[in-house]
Image (cartoon, rainbow, N blue to C red):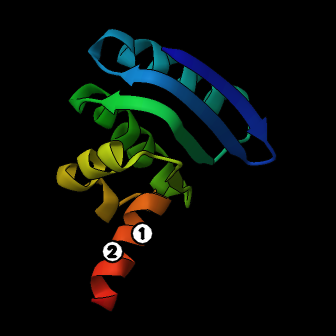
Amino acid sequence: MQFSLQVIKDGLFARLEGEFDLLVADEIREQLNRALKKSAAKHIVFDFSKLTFIDSSGLGVILGRWRQLAPMGGKVTIIGSSPQVYRILQLSGLTRVIIVEEPIKTRIARLKEEIQ
């Protein structure tokens, strides 16, 4: 798992590459918490463009940051997920509380179905 953080104004940009699972969830949670405490960030953008898998541990980290930031008016956004990862996010119910951009491939497939 590759993981990088960058603070941009009041936002924290987190790029994840590989598998976001039980093996790395605690470390990522700790790094996110440290970065949030150290900076003035109240929003997080997760870049999942190179994420290949996420399990319930990874989902828990994301939901935990949402619970942490929401009372302050903060937002959590996920961008760049693959159709497979997006489907996991949908099935978990995360897309109902967190802003998750629909993958372009999924959007195109949905539009094709609507046209037919």
In-image side of 76 versus 38 (left or right): left
Counting from the top left corner in percent of width and height, residue 56 is at 22, 31
> Is residue 79 in view?
yes
Can you say which quadrant of the picture contains the C terminus? bottom left
Furthest-front residue in this view? 116
Q: How many marks?
A: 2
Mark seen at residue 41: none
In-image side of 95 versus 103 (left or right): left
Residue drawn at 39 percent across, 13 percent down: 24
Residue drawn at 29 percent across, 49 percent down: 89
> Is residue 100 in view?
no
In-image side of 115 versus 41 (left or right): left
Counting from the top left corner in percent of width and height, residue 7 is at 75, 36
Q: Quadrant of residue 6?
A: top right
Amino acid type shown at disc 1? Arg
Mark 2, residue position: 110
Cα–Cα gap, marks 1 and 2: 5 Å
Amino acid type shown at disc 2? Arg
- Kind of element beneath mark 1: helix
Pointer 1 local density, CA inside 10 Å: few below 14, some 14–19, many at least 20: few
Mark 1, residue position: 107
Furthest-right residue in this view? 9
Foreground pick, 102 / 69:
102
The answer to the question of whether label 1 and label 2 lie on touching residues, with beta carbons closer than 8 A, is yes
Residue drawn at 43 percent across, 70 percent down: 108
Residue drawn at 57 percent across, 41 percent down: 47
